[in-house]
Amino acid sequence: MIDQELTALLLYPLLGGLLLALLGAKKWAAELNSLMSFCTFAASVLLAIGVVDSGPQVAFSEQFFIDQFNVFLVMLTTFVAFTTSLFSRPYMRIEQEHGKLSTPMLHLYYSMYQLFTFTMLVALTANNMGIIWVAMEAATLTTVLLVSLYRTPASLEAAWKYFILCGVGIALALFGTILLYFAAERVLGQGGDALLWTHLNQVKTELEPTVLKLAFVFLLVGYGTKIGLVPLHSWLPDAHAEGPTPISAVLSGLLLNVALCAVMRSKVLVDGSLGTHFAGNLMMGFGLLSVVVASLFLSRQKDLKRMFAYSSVEHMGLITFAFGMGGPVASFAALLHMTMHSLTKSAIFFAVGHAVQTAGTQQMANIRGILQISPTIGWGLLLGTFAILGMPPFGVFASEFLIISTAMHAYPWTTPFLLVALGIAFSAIFGKIQPIVFGETTAKRLPHSPALLPVFSHLLLVLIFGLYMPLYLANWYRQAAALLG
Amino acid sequence: MENLLPGILLQLFQSLLVVMAAPLLTGWVVMCRAWLQNRSAAGLFQPYRLLQKLFSKNAVIADNASVLFRVTPYILFGCMWLAAAIIPILAVDLPFSPAADVIALVGVFALARMFIALAAMDIGTAFGSLGARREMLVSFLAEPALIMVLFTASTISHSTQLPRIVDTLAHQHFALYPSLAFAALAFVMVLLAENARIPIDNPSTHLELTMIHEAMILEYSARHLALIEWASSLKLFAYISLGIALFIPHGIAGAGDWGALPLAMLALLLKMIVAGAGLALLETILAKMRIFRAPEYLGTAFLLAVLGLLIHFLLGT
Amino acid sequence: MMGAQTISLTVQFVNLLAALLLLIVFAMLSQRRILSLINLFAWQGLVLSVSTFVVAYSTDQPHLYYSAWLTLLLKVIALPWLLHRLIRKLNVKWDVETLINIPTTMLVGIALVIFAFNLAAPISQLSEGITRGLIGIALASVLLSLLMMLTRRKAISQVVGFLSMENGLFFAATSSTHGMPLVVELGIALDVLVATFIFGIFFFQIRETFDNLDITHMEKLKDD
């Protein structure tokens, strides 16, 4: 039933990656990249409509599984991947003109961009926990060379750190997967079926609790490295700051979500097996720690992209915390926050990317008065900052409000931590962005017009979600939240 | 009760055997080494000739030597003889068997070591205290490793009594013990270190920068030196028989099984020949280490022994 | 009776191989020379593939033979060959690493082994037959490889640590669960291969930028 849509969804990025790799650095590579991303997005919309209408489905002899939860992430991923591809066309052109990038590097960038989308989509839609792991690792592999695209010492260091830390993390996740299989094999028997999530979900109450407990710890620590949970986050600011900005945007807005999706899949199984709140407590702990530590780090940042990377750690912590609380409202809020964060953070990175290009540096002390040189970039950055800090009427406000009010009811002791952390984050980010946007400028004009459509379309969506939530979407989120329990 | 007399006889026999055969083993090792290094050997009985020569000389003792210096060779010899005599090498039930506890054995070795180190410092020469300090460094690291090896063997048989350990290993059905393999490796390393062998020490050198054991006994002469040399042979013999008892006890005579004794003798002879040759081979292919690398070497031995113990607990075979 | 005897012998053999695996990881942890490190890695792969063959034979699982052959090809032949080529090309064949305090590292290693055994103890209780206790050893070798990555300063040794960690995981998969589904194992093997290629690319980039493969140069990115 959904085989065609799914095939299209996975085939476009794969085909795009191969085409871009084979055809070489053609002039229209950026356009082809955007076209492929758009086709992928279109396929995801068709897929989403099918799934939301008729419920969870499996495809290709049960190797793929789509339900309301992951189809929502698929759609978010393809959408942001599409807008980022629109953004990267002018951005990369300007980088090339500034002499930062050579043509072969650009060639690598475009082909890897499509393959990266492909691996993320496989990780999201695969039904086999083992394949999810393989795809997550592949997603690291496709991005690691992109982080070191500029070949500066700092970018190499960041990429190496990213590779090693995520490699280690993902290895621990593999151990968790092996343990999961170990438990599953005793119930489902040998063979490939024992790692299929749908099968596991059916027998989750029979799975051995002691094994699943240990497995979840490893899975959370492993995939948690990818999510950027404290204390496993140290690769994240480096990779975001030193890689090209479109990659920062998709890492922050998408890859972290994908890793979280894998964790949620495991959590459902562990909850079923244990019957306790063990997994939730663990996630809440990691989430809360991330929120608090990241907000403390925010005020010490000097690098613009690095600061927003820490902001991603903070928000992923908040989402993990909300998923950890569980229940329909918290899960709903977490899903909403996931959407809002992805849209807002990628919009911010788009604006930041151009701001950095005009100023020629990432050091915040040297970027001043963006509004004077380019009002659109300035306003984009300012509005994005307002949105990510949770100012009404943007959507982030709604989701953060939901999360905190749920926490107040269920776990009152966490509220002061959350509120203080969000307060610190607010003052830190706002205090640093304000002089960047206003003030006297030393920046130069860009050789090409910046990409503004992605920035403002994202912000517009966030604003709409803040003011009005369409019933169709609300229902969709509610169903997804119900699946997560 | 009727077993008591032959038991005592056998114990006496074993005690005499070890004390007489120990220099033979040393001679065998030296001979193998000579062969391996393409030299002509001095003969199997060279250690006896050396002992005889030393015993027939007049002892010279430093003016400021105390009583400790004089009695140490006797204590050393006594300790080593005791150790070599109680390790079950021929039969498992001897009258001294209850004394053959592995921890007591380590204690006996430690006692001897303490006396020789004290005696070395007694004279007050620079070499004596240098050797004593190095000896203490090596033994302080080797002893825990040895104890861990012994623990590994005793956890398998649930006893620290050597005869029980030997009996369990020798007379039960064949099994692969990964833990014992680790322990055996560690034991060989400790054996090399404790008996002043390459790579930690070189028994045939008097090079001041490297010697350990020889530095300690530099002031001894005549009968004292003879006793110390003999004790060294006995120590080597004791260590090798301990190794045989722990890791390849197969062929030892069972409790009250007198008929198996000749076969046990033969097996022991064979094992000793192989062990001596192996030792000579090791000494030929290894190079002497700098003394500062010794902690690393012995640390590795300790690690292996601990791993053996851990693996025993985990795999539980 | 006869059957029981043979099974117990294979169990003993696999146990022995597991112990050997642990020993090799410790040897890697204390190895100074990069060339020997790579050879040790190849030995580790060999032990791994032999143990997979034994498990495949004793449990009569045909798909395990495939993964045993895959291990042999990939981890005993291909990856060491690739690494040998790399160090020849990068001219670091005789590089010696200064390790800090091997005894301390070893003690930390022992502590990790105890930790791993404890962690795996409840799982060992559950499993029957051939797998008892092996998951603890596998976890221990994973953690020890992790320790190796932490203590090393050369990029190549870190990568060998990474690959050795993967070996530990593979051992966990074959010994405790008789191997993951084949499609997953193929995917993992592909990832490892690609990762090694990317590591190779990195070596060249790092050397080009920093003049050698010492990653002590790469500690500039910090939050001050």
Image (tube, coloured by chain):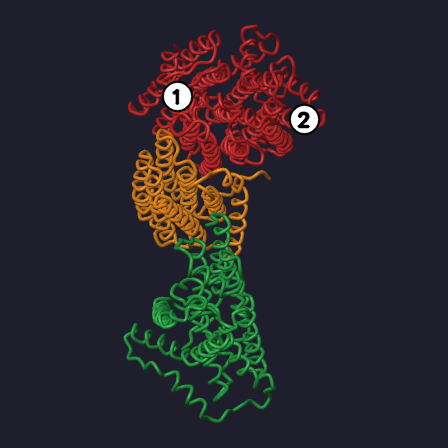
Chain colours: A red, B green, C orange
In the picture shown, does residue B293 fall above or below C9? below
Work out which residue is located at the far front of the displayed protein and give it: B2
Report the residue marked by disc 1.
Answer: A63
Who is closer to the viewer here, B2 or A221?
Answer: B2
Label 2 lies in what chain? A
Q: Is residue B277 visible?
A: no
* Neighbourhood count class around disc 1 (C-alpha, 10 Å): few under 14, some 14–19, many 20 upward: some
Q: Please state the chain letter of the residue tagged with numbered disc 1 in the rendered image.
A: A
Q: Which residue is mark 2?
A: A418
Percent x, y for residue C214? 44, 48
Q: Position of residue C221 (x, y in %)?
A: 53, 39
Q: Is residue A137 above or below residue A457?
A: below
Q: Secondary structure at mark 2?
A: helix
The amino acid at mark 1 is Gln
| Residue B228 numbered mark, or none | none
2 or 1: mark nearer the eye? 1
Query: Dot 2 surroundings within 10 Å: few (below 14), some, or many (20 or more)?
Result: many
Assign the C terminus of chain A to one quadrant of the image. top right
Residue at 55%, 14% in the rendered image: A459
Residue B263 falls in which quadrant of the image?
bottom left
